[in-house]
Image: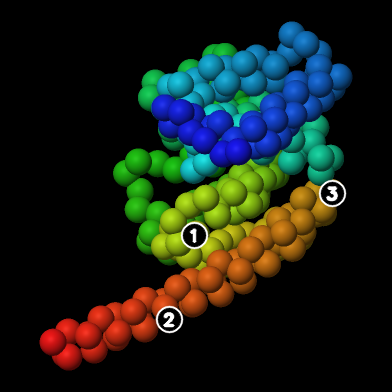
Amino acid sequence: AVFRESGSYCEKGGKNLYQSSRLLLERRIALLYGAESLPMAALDLVMKEMCAIRGFRRFDGSDFYMHCVDVANFLISYGITDRDAIVGALLHDMIEDVPGYTEEGLAVLFGEKPARYVSLVSKKPDCDYHDPAVLTGYLDEISADVYAAAIKTADRMHNMSTLFEAGIEKRYRKAIETETYFIPFFKQCRKRYPRYESLFQAAKTHIQPLIFEIKSHYADYCELSRLRERNEADQCADL
């Protein structure tokens, strides 16, 4: 059964899946870095700050921090276990989305490297990322750092895989943006960082079918809208 209460995510299967993902990451962090490590502290912080009760929800109503958990799990699954990279993955939305957090503040808490990764992938409020030159420059700067590039790749992979909860117009815009800018970004990073080419190649092969499906659905939606409008116009003409 599916039900929602106060906007929270209450689908039993989905909730159990998210719980499993978080527990998997906790076990991985404990084994790789220790139970009192910086990655564990980063997980605790993002769970506290980016939970549904504080207004941070995904399209499906689940705690937003699960997105950060899945991004970190993606990196570990593709062989990226650098401690600072995992911390950066967990915190990658903090500067952009949570008031009061800055690169300098995160550097004090977690060190300069993960704070820098978070800063690189964070969009600046005074920039127009609908401008092709701005978005291209943003991705070019990220691609110059292997771990920032990996975080951004895992971020886009997860966002695209969960995009079907969003409205059709938003899905289409994200699909076109990803096809135009991110697929070339993945290719560039795969050539630039061969040790992690499996991640960048997986992003491309995982996302391209999603783009095709979204574009196909959007074309059907536009055609149905056109036919409905024509039918409504014909009915008005008959009155």
Kindly check if marks 1 and 2 are in contact, taking CB atoms under 8 A apart as contact. no
Estimate how packed mark 3 is, as few (under 14), some (14 to 19) or many (20 or more) residues with alpha carbons within 10 Å: few
Amino acid type of the residue that numbered disc 1 sits on in the rendered structure:
Arg
Q: Is residue 119 left or right of residue 152?
A: left
Amino acid type of the residue that numbered disc 3 sits on in the rendered structure:
Arg
Numbered tag placed on residue 223 in the rendering? 2
Which residue was labeled with disc 1?
171
- The residue sitting at 38% across, 24% down in the picture is 99
Quadrant of the rendering where the C terminus is positioned = bottom left
- The residue sitting at 29% across, 86% down in the picture is 230
Q: Earlier in the sequence, mark 1 or mark 3?
A: 1
Picture quarter containing residue 123?
Answer: top left
Q: Earlier in the sequence, mark 1 or mark 2?
A: 1
Q: Which numbered mark, 1 or 3, is in the foreground of this view?
A: 1
Amino acid type of the residue that numbered disc 2 sits on in the rendered structure:
Glu
Estimate how packed mark 1 is, as few (under 14), some (14 to 19) or many (20 or more) residues with alpha carbons within 10 Å: many
The Cα atoms of the two marked residues, 1 and 2, are separated by 17 Å
Q: Which numbered mark, 1 or 2, is in the foreground of this view?
A: 2
Q: Is residue 105 above or below residue 232?
A: above
Which residue was labeled with disc 3?
195
Q: Nearer the viewer, residue 158 or 106?
A: 158
The Cα atoms of the two marked residues, 1 and 3, are separated by 32 Å
Residue 171 in picture, x, y percent from top left: 49, 60
The Cα atoms of the two marked residues, 3 and 2, are separated by 45 Å
Coloration mode:
rainbow
- The residue sitting at 58% across, 21% down in the picture is 47
